[in-house]
Amino acid sequence: MSIDFVGSQTTFSGIAAPRVSLTFSVAKRFMDVAVSLALLPLVAVCAVLFLVMNPIPNRGRLFFRQIRMGRGGRAFVVYKFRSIKPGHGEISGPYGPVETSCITPLGRALRRSRIDELPQVINVLLGNMSLIGPRPDCIHHARFYLRDVPDYRAQLGVRPEIRGYAQTEVGYA
């Protein structure tokens, strides 16, 4: 695996997108944008509510930002409502347990309801993510998976999604 550094973005060479029809690509992107725009008011309402509620049970910033690996192995910043204590985020290893001790009381409710994922519609509008596709992994986990997981590279050929199959079936583990 060779790694190319282009400006501040890390890309992994040899990752090609699958061939799909132009009609499918345009229709999929149109649906991504339309659904994301429809969800933006909900994101705004939740942001205002959490901004008011946040200082009490969830001290620190409202949003959590993390660098994830997206389509073509390009790095991008994913946005979520913060559900963990400040200073935590990329501590555990790729196969480590979920560190429940760093999850805030409000964060537990956000994760159970999956509301913490709502700000990712911004990533969809920016073109970094899609509504349908594989879940993006944080950069240091993705590097590990590229080295050790057979065929992991194939999922980097498509735009990642807000909610992946593994998260649907297994949860946050």
Image (cartoon, helix red, strand yellow):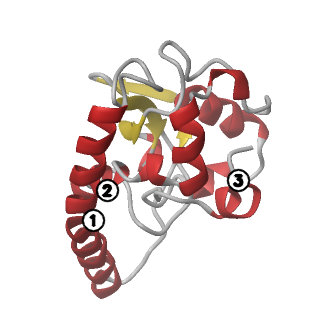
Residue tagged 1: 39
Q: Who's the residue at 31% across and 57% down the image?
A: 124
Circles 1 and 2: CB atoms closer than 8 Å: yes
Residues packed near mark 2 inside 10 Å, few (<14), some (14 to 19) or many (20 plus): many
Circles 2 and 3: CB atoms closer than 8 Å: no
- Is 159 on the left-hand or right-hand side of 41? right
Residue 122 seen in this snapshot: yes
Circles 1 and 3: CB atoms closer than 8 Å: no
The kind of secondary structure element at disc 2 is helix
Residue tagged 3: 171
Question: Where is residue 85 drawn, in percent x and y?
Answer: 53, 19
CA gap, disc 2 and disc 3: 20 Å
The kind of secondary structure element at disc 3 is loop
Along the viewing direction, whichever of 85 and 10 lies nearer the viewer: 85
Query: Could you tell me which quadrant the N terminus lies in?
Result: top right
Along the viewing direction, whichever of 73 and 109 lies nearer the viewer: 109
- Identify residue type, mark 2: Val
Question: Where is residue 2 drawn, in percent x and y?
Answer: 55, 30
- Is 136 on the left-hand or right-hand side of 92? left
- Identify residue type, mark 1: Leu
Query: Could you tell me which quadrant the C terminus lies in?
Result: top right
Question: In the rendering, which numbered label is found on residue 161?
Answer: none
CA gap, disc 1 and disc 3: 22 Å
Question: Where is residue 131 drawn, in percent x and y?
Answer: 41, 67
Residue tagged 2: 121
Residues packed near mark 3 inside 10 Å, few (<14), some (14 to 19) or many (20 plus): few
161 w.r.t. 92: above or below: below
- Picture quarter containing residue 4? top left
Q: Earlier in the sequence, mark 1 or mark 3?
A: 1
Q: Earlier in the sequence, mark 1 or mark 2?
A: 1
- Identify residue type, mark 3: Gly
Question: Where is residue 48 drawn, in percent x and y?
Answer: 23, 42
